Amino acid sequence: MKQAVMIGAGQIGRGFIGMLLEKAGYHVVFADVNMDVVNDINTRGEYTVHLMDTVCEETVVKNISAMHVASPELVDAIAQPECDLICTSVGLTALTKVAPVIASGLSLRRRNGVEEPMNIIACENAIRGTSQLKAMVEEYLEEEDLAWLPEHTGFPDSAVDRIIPPRHDVSAAESYVERYHEWDVERGGFIGEIPEVEGMEVVDDLTAYLERKLFTLNGPNAVTACMGYERSYPTINETLKDPEVYAVVWGMMEECCAMLVKRHGFSPESLEQYRKNLMQRFMNPYIIDDCVRVAREPIRKLSPQDRIIAPMMHAYDYGIPTPSYYTGVASVLLYANPEEPQCMEIQKMLAEGGVRRVMEQVCDVHEDDVITAIEKEYERLKG
């Protein structure tokens, strides 16, 4: 039986990618750092995915097993000839921790003479996450492994889209997801026969889909979370009931979509429907997403190539006004959660050098008119 390794047994790993792989006929080996999750999966031998919408459905996932991500057994599992697919869902910053394990497994495949092709897909909220993972893996490979790699291992980039907020009131035996899902994988990155997985869409050029999702969904979602925290709303859907927040988030989506039309040639009609669907998903009463969770790591989210600054500056280059983005950036700067280290680092920079220092040092934005506009919004919101 063909086998896939799913590194990361969180909500995306179990409630989305792992479920699709199991339904495609794979035995799915989950790897995670949480031994409670690992033991629960191995004890029960199954889990249930609850689709939460106006019509609720349940799917039982059975053909599974689990192990710790640092166990020697994971290296052996990757080296097995029947294992032809590895997926990750651990968060971009954690890829550095799983890269050496993947490298060890690939090296063992080579030494064992395994000729069957393998594909590795990073299912992360990041631009070209798989390409970043590939570079990390290659750092741990010897010359013989690097020479062997291109003919035996593919690294297709992907974009994943499904809102699956964590729930602390359920065990690993259950996962709660929204109905909508999208998993786009770039055709050119595959080696060998492309796996047939219902729900995985193979596309020729992934960049447009990556940016559409990261910029239109993740950016406004992060701003919603920061505004919600400052206004004492606990969840995303509660925050968006506030007319002022709704107006800012909807405005960001409109400005972003105007940019995407020019940058990638999307039709205005398709993007209008896309952002309408996004707003409905954000406000789904069955999917409760915590503002503190969504707002975490604000420095990363304000980096120049990420979900907020990149679309704002692309729009600026096209001459598209972005007043909602200015409000959104100011809202993230005002996010003052004392339990979030990156948040406190931003607050320290603001106290020492004001908005301009953060914009220049964190966001790599030096355009005076942009900084001035954000400064004005920051002072307005702060007042």
Image (tube, helix red, strand yellow):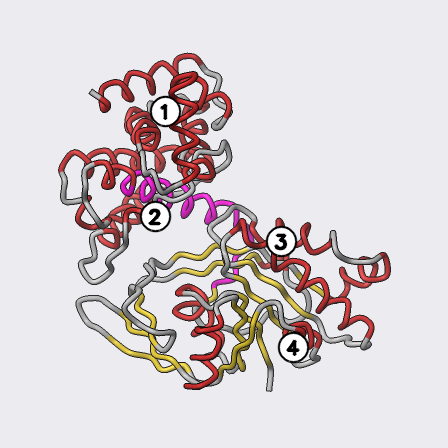
Residue at position x 80%, y 70% from top?
110
Residue density around tag 4, few if under 14, some if 14–19, many if 20 or more, within 10 Å: some
Residue 122 lies in quadrant: bottom right
Assess whether residue 346 is covered by the magenta stretch: no
Residue 56 drawn at (x, y percent) = 22, 73
Q: Which residue matches tag 3?
A: 133
Distance from Cα at disc 4 to Cα at disc 1: 53 Å
Name the kind of residue labelled 1 in the image: Ile
The magenta stretch is 201-225
**Which comes sooner in the sequence, label 4 or label 1?**
4
Residue density around tag 1, few if under 14, some if 14–19, many if 20 or more, within 10 Å: some
Disc 1 versus disc 3: nearer the observer: 3
Distance from Cα at disc 1 to Cα at disc 3: 34 Å
**Which comes sooner in the sequence, label 4 or label 3?**
4
**Which comes sooner in the sequence, label 1 or label 2?**
2
Position of 237 with respect to 72 (left or right) is: left
Residue 20 lies in quadrant: bottom left
Name the kind of residue labelled 3 in the image: Leu
Q: Which residue matches tag 2?
A: 294
Name the kind of residue labelled 4 in the image: Glu
Residue at position x 47%, y 39% from top?
300
Dot 4 falls on a residue whose secondary structure is: helix
Residue 265 drawn at (x, y percent) = 44, 40
- Which numbered tag is attached to residue 320? 1
**Which comes sooner in the sequence, label 4 or label 2?**
4
Name the kind of residue labelled 2 in the image: Val
Q: Which residue matches tag 4?
A: 73
